[in-house]
Image: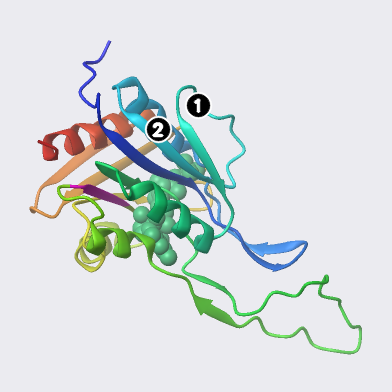
Amino acid sequence: VREPDLAGRHVVVSAGGTREPLDPVRFLGNRSSGKQGYALARTAAARGARVTLLAANASMPDPAGVDVVRVGTAVELREAMLRAAADADAVVMAAAVADFRPATYATGKIKKKDDQEPAPITLVRNPDILAEISTTRARSGQVVVGFAAETDDVLANGRAKLKRKGCDLLVVNEVGERKTFGSEENEAVVLGADGSETPVAHGPKEALADTVWDLVAARLE
Ligand code: PMT
């Protein structure tokens, strides 16, 4: 049994993948299942934290003892995140957030017309929630953790992303069509803004989650 080293702390975790609707039946989405974020929520609760889990399109049941807020799009996730982070000691963003959304939403199903080429889909930028949370710091001493899902030059891209986003810790993991997304296991390197690099060997997503909370706990006084 673990020490309740997060007792009295409020932590916010995002999980799953946003869906950006095109019309009432279609969306742009990604392969995140929410398993890594749910593992973070469960392990934080087991260590005594009050946990708010912002779940984007995850199909798992609510973890016991965790406050779950369900969201769909990146814009909805941002609103829920700003509200939940206002009094949070730590924020961990494991959700896969769409960088872009369709510029327009068709209120009726987009029809295929036999004599026409398909219309291109115009995209606009979504807000960068992690960068905003990192620069705002709703509460002094708040620890902010991001994830980086990379397919190539994993560590180099992760190091650049850490600087760009301004978070305290960035968990860099490799993803692919059948890698990390939806699986029970993960492996990662956790980069610190202080230059630290903590490798986490291949194992259950709970083990990576516990390493993240160890690093967070060390940064909370
Ligand atoms: O859910 P699983 O199936 O268990 O898979 C886990 C996972 C692969 C989804 C997870 O481990 C992971 O890597 N999550 C982050 C996915 C992601 O969006 O990575 P990114 O490199 O595109 O984004 C970097 C960080 O910025 C993330 O913390 C993301 O939440 C955040 N972000 C991204 C875009 C945006 N507009 N706003 C954001 O806040």
Q: Is residue 25 above or below residue 203?
A: below
Q: What count of labels does the image hold?
A: 2
Q: Which type of secondary structure does the marked residue at label 1 adopt?
A: loop
Q: Ligand 1, what quadrant? A: bottom left
Give the side of residue 19 with respect to residue 158, left or right. Answer: right
Write down the region rendered in magenta.
Answer: 142-146
Structural distance between the alpha carbons of marks 2 and 1: 8 Å
Whether label 2 touches label 1, CB < 8 Å: yes
Q: Quadrant of the C terminus?
A: top left
Q: Is residue 183 visible?
A: no
Which of 6 and 178 lies nearest the eye of the viewer?
Answer: 6
Q: Residue 41's mark?
A: 2
Q: Which residue is mark 1?
A: 63
Residue placed furthest toward the right = 114
Query: Residue at position x 90%, y 89% from top?
Result: 115
Q: Secondary structure at mark 2?
A: helix
Q: In x, y percent, where is residue 216?
A: 20, 38
Q: Main secondary structure of the magenta part?
A: strand
Per the image, is 196 magenta? no
Within 10 Å of disc 2 (Cα), the crowding (few <14, some 14-19, many 20+) is many
| Position above or below: 169 against 59 | below
Relative horizontal placement of residue 5, taking residue 45 as reference (left or right): left
